[in-house]
Image (cartoon, rainbow, N blue to C red):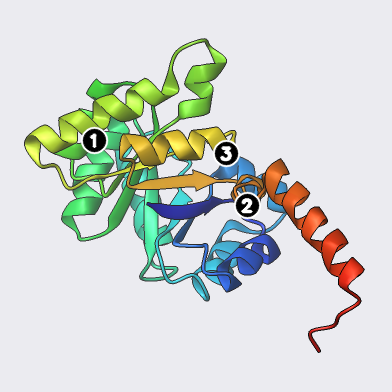
Amino acid sequence: MKFFIDTADVPAIRDLHDLGMVDGVTTNPSLIMKSGRDIIEVTREICSFVEGPVSAEVVALEADAMIKEGRHLAEIASNIAVKLPLTWDGLKACKVLSGEGKMVNVTLCFSPNQALLAAKAGATFISPFIGRLDDIHLDGMELIHDIRAIYDNYDFKTEILAASIRSVNHVTQCALAGSDVITAPPEVIRKLAAHPLTDAGLAQFMKDWEKTGQKII
């Protein structure tokens, strides 16, 4: 499973990239606002060192304007994935931009039918929002299972990019469900390495080592 980092915080991306933990990056208008930087400038900087897809989202709501913005964003770098909302106009824009050979990430997916439409429109990625479904007491992981079954039934090439990841358990569940990609904030990726038994075991090892009075170097 590929790890995309859901942030526009360049130092945080670089830190995880140096560990080989970054297969791509996703951004959105809220993350751009949080970065406090110009969308073109920060996206170009991210693309300068991240080899995988970097999603940059349009803000237009009408298909022709989405296409125009998408083409402009795609000029930033060859690894840009144009991010479009899962609306009828977004699907129209997806069909055009994917037909031009551009990567397209269709976002804000909340149902299997929406995912089916995105695949038929040529989406490179579909982004189902797990956490937001959980927030309204629905099972976000059920959506991942359903999309996986539909895509496998018909051999769709669209990759499932699980989004709105809130916890390390979400990451595990997505991997078990067969999600192609997860996109998560840097802090969630870091928490994947944490376990209280690891900490306890290390503390015991260090305590016992100190008793030996030895040094390795």
The amino acid pointed to by label 2 is: Ala
- Answer above or below: position of 147 versus 53: above
Q: Secondary structure at mark 1?
A: helix
Q: Secondary structure at mark 3?
A: helix
| Residue mark closest to the camera, 2 vs 1 | 2
- Describe residue 214's horizontal placement relative to residue 157 as left or right: right
Q: Which of the two residues, 128 or 80, is positioned nearer the viewer here?
A: 128
The amino acid pointed to by label 3 is: Val
Q: Give the residue pinned by disc 2.
A: 193
Q: Which of the two residues, 162 or 40, is positioned nearer the viewer here?
A: 162
Whole-number angstrom distance, CA of label 2 to CA of label 1: 34 Å
Q: Earlier in the sequence, mark 1 or mark 3?
A: 1
Name the residue: 85% across, 83% down: 215
User: Can the viewer see residue 44 in this picture?
Assistant: yes
| Residue mark closest to the camera, 2 vs 3 | 2
Task: Characterize the local packing of mark 3: few (<14), some (14-19) or many (20 or more) Cα atoms within 10 angstroms.
Answer: some
Q: Give the residue pinned by disc 3.
A: 168
Q: Position of residue 12 (x, y in %)?
A: 67, 61
Q: Position of residue 165 (x, y in %)?
A: 53, 36
Q: Which mark is residue 118?
A: 1
In contact (CB < 8 Å): disc 2 and disc 3: no
Q: Position of residue 55 (x, y in %)?
A: 44, 53
